[in-house]
Amino acid sequence: MIAAEQKARVTYDNLLRLIDDPDVRDPIKFLRAREVVHYQRFGDALRVAQDRLDSRNFYAYNPSYDTGRCHRKDK
């Protein structure tokens, strides 16, 4: 998702280099600013998710899960 935001921002930058009309440039500047904010918010959300991925995450941090000792065996 972050890559899409960056791609949109680059597209708006390229358009702004080509367009001189202020009536066209102003909305593009607004859209570009919005993409920058979206990129920052997605980055913030990713950092929060990574920070919360801790020992409470059974599958990521329980070594016995990989060895099969935690699996229920119905035999």
Image (cartoon, grey):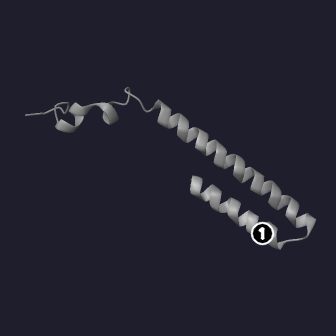
Task: Residue 12 in the image: state x and y as whole percent.
Answer: 74, 63
Rendered residue at 71%/46% (across/down): 37
Q: Residue furthest left?
A: 75
Secondary structure of the residue carrying numbered label 1: helix
Q: Residue furthest right?
A: 22
Q: Which residue is mark 1?
A: 15
Q: Residue furthest front?
A: 17
Number of numbered markers: 1
15 versus 65 height, above or below: below
Rendered residue at 87%/59% (across/down): 26
Q: Nearer the viewer, residue 69 or 55?
A: 55
Q: Residue furthest top?
A: 56
31 versus 20 height, above or below: above
The three-letter amino acid code for the residue at tag 1 is Leu
Task: Residue 41 in the image: state x and y as whole percent.
Answer: 64, 42
3 versus 49 height, above or below: below
Left or right: residue 74 compared with residue 55 = left
Q: Quadrant of the C terminus?
A: top left
Left or right: residue 35 compared with residue 22 = left
Rendered residue at 54%/41% (across/down): 46
Q: Quadrant of residue 68?
A: top left
Left or right: residue 36 compared with residue 3 = right
Rendered residue at 58%/52% (across/down): 2
Mark 1 burial class by Cα count in 10 Å: few <14, some 14-19, many 20+: some
